[in-house]
Image (tube, helix red, strand yellow):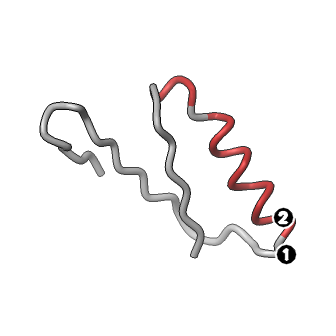
Amino acid sequence: MANIIHKGPYEDCTPTYEKLYAWLEENHKKFVGSILVRNATEKGLECEF
């Protein structure tokens, strides 16, 4: 399992995903399954699934 945290607006998350995919490739890992995204807001850390 790989985890990565993006801090900032959703619109700016592409470089975060690119870093994750690069790490997977560099470490000879494969992407299998789905991505779980949790969005925390500044108002009480509410999560969306």
Disc 1 element:
loop
Pointer 1 with pointer 2, Cβ within 8 A: yes
Q: Quadrant of residue 27?
A: bottom right
Q: Furthest residue to the left?
A: 44
Residue in the picture at 33% in, 42% down: 39
Look at mark 2 in the image and give the residue it sits on: 25
Q: How crowded is mark 2: few (under 14 residues within 10 Å), some or many (20 or more)?
A: few
Please give the count of numbered marks on the rendered protein.
Answer: 2
Look at mark 1 in the image and give the residue it sits on: 28
Q: Give the number of the disc on residue 38.
A: none
Q: Where is residue 41 in the image (x, y as percent from the top left)?
A: 25, 34
Task: Give amino acid for label 1.
Answer: His
Which of these two is toward me, 8 or 28?
8
Disc 2 element:
helix
Task: Give amino acid for label 2.
Answer: Glu
- Quick check: 17 above or below 1? above
CA separation, marks 1 and 2? 5 Å
Which of these two is toward me, 5 or 10?
5
Residue in the picture at 46% in, 30% down: 8
- Quick check: 42 above or below 28? above
Residue in the picture at 74% in, 55% down: 21
- Which quadrant is the N terminus positioned in? bottom right
Residue in the picture at 69% in, 67% down: 31
Q: How crowded is mark 1: few (under 14 residues within 10 Å), some or many (20 or more)?
A: few
Q: Position of residue 6 (x, y in %)?
A: 51, 42
Q: In which quarter of the image is residue 24?
A: bottom right
Q: Where is residue 20 in the image (x, y as percent from the top left)?
A: 68, 55
- Quick check: 17 above or below 27? above
